[in-house]
Image: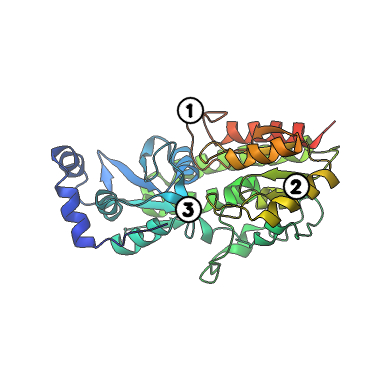
């Protein structure tokens, strides 16, 4: 994608030119990262927004750089958004997912940042696109303790899979990191953030257990989906992801890849081709038609919109579990 590099001075001028509404909203900020007494938190896209809202509760005001229904990989940051980053009390983002966000944060230099990638481990699931990934036993990732990820350096993770939120265990690790970041940015409400973090981590643990039990007794381990967003989920629960495209949802599969998927579908008794809500389903439906397979939605939860099967992360993840159970032939 073409990303325009923004200049901080131009960003501030652009924000000022947007009118009195923006200026009035910022006037209550008083330069301390708060609006009307609440900590201003800017989230890069929905999974980060969900954590900030659930952990921050009534003590924070959360806004998202990515609007509902927008594919986050395609986001381009406006001058006004860059200005908002510089005024926020905390910015919650996932480094490496949205290049324009990474650049805007470097330019805006916010007071406090919480990088989700620093709270857990990132891995390269690119080999799964070619069907070469040899997955281990169910739930065996070798990255169970979040303590092992403190200060993890992701400077060399340019090819790493960023979709960590689709593994409830890793997402819980990120939730704890975001909770600590909120405590640091707003010590006066530390007790609230601790309480809300504990409650959310417990809910994510229940979700993890439901996936483990819900996927037992399955007839197949293999599922085919539009793009390689589900590598962490597959790894966590002993499944095999076969993506039509790679980590980029807009990339087109090669003829060799399509032919390979035909072979995999027949060999592994695949009965469903999954598509998503925020990207075109044309290739998935074409493949399913050629193989006489059904289609269904497996949502990477990069945003919540009118087509989402639920109102928040937890609800959509449970809809994903239901779809996987049906596709994998669980008893």
Q: Quadrant of residue 246?
A: bottom right
Q: Quadrant of residue 67?
A: top left
**Residue at 59%, 43% in the rendered image:** 201
Q: Tell me residue 46's x, y (percent).
A: 47, 42
Residue bearing the label numbered 3: 180
Residue bearing the label numbered 2: 237
- Are there few (<14), some (14-19), or many (20+) residues within 10 Å of tag 3? some
**Residue at 79%, 49% in the rendered image:** 264
Q: Tell me residue 241's x, y (percent).
A: 71, 49
**Can you say which quadrant of the picture contains the C terminus?**
top right
Single out the mark in the foreground, 3 or 2. 2
Single out the mark in the foreground, 2 or 1. 1
Q: Quadrant of residue 281?
A: top right
| Label 2 residue SS | loop
Pick whichever, 141 or 272, lies toward us.
272
Q: Tell me residue 205's x, y (percent).
A: 66, 41
Pick whichever, 267 or 76, lies toward us.
267
Whether residue 232 sits left or right of residue 33 in the image: it is right
Whether residue 70 sits left or right of residue 22 in the image: it is right
* Residue 183 visible in rendering: no
Q: Which numbered dot is residue 236?
A: none
| Label 1 residue SS | loop
CA gap, disc 2 to disc 1?
29 Å
Residue bearing the label numbered 1: 306
């Amino acid at each position: 994608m073409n990303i325009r590099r923004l200049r901080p001075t131009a960003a501030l001028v652009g924000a000022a030119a947007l009118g009195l509404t923006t200026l009035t909203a910022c006037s209550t900020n008083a330069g301390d990262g708060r609006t009307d007494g609440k900590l201003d938190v800017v989230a890069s896209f929905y999974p980060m927004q969900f954590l900030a809202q659930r952990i921050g509760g009534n003590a924070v005001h959360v806004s998202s750089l990515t609007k509902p229904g927008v594919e986050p990989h395609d986001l381009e940051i406006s001058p006004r958004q860059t200005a908002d980053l510089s005024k926020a009390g905390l910015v919650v983002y996932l480094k490496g997912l949205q290049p324009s966000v990474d650049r805007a944060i470097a330019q805006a230099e916010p007071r406090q940042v919480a990088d989700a990638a620093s709270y857990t481990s990132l891995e390269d699931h690119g080999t799964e696109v070619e069907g070469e990934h040899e997955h281990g036993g169910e739930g065996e990732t070798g990255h169970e303790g979040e303590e092992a990820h403190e200060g993890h350096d992701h400077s060399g993770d340019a090819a790493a899979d960023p979709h960590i939120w689709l593994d409830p265990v890793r997402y819980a690790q990120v939730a704890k990191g975001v909770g600590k970041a909120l405590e640091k940015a707003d010590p006066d409400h530390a007790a609230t953030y601790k309480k809300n973090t504990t409650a959310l981590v417990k809910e994510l643990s229940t979700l993890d257990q439901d996936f483990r039990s819900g996927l037992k007794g399955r007839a197949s381990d293999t599922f085919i989906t539009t793009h390689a967003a589900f590598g962490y989920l597959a790894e966590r629960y002993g499944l095999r992801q076969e993506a039509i495209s790679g980590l980029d949802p807009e990339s087109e599969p090669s003829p060799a890849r399509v032919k390979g998927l035909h072979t995999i579908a027949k060999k592994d008794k695949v009965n469903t081709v999954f598509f998503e809500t925020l990207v075109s389903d044309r290739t998935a439906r074409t493949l399913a038609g050629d193989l006489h397979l059904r289609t269904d939605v497996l949502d990477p939860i990069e945003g919540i919109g009118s087509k989402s099967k639920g109102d928040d992360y937890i609800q959509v993840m449970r809809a994903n579990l239901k779809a996987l159970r049906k596709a994998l032939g669980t008893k």
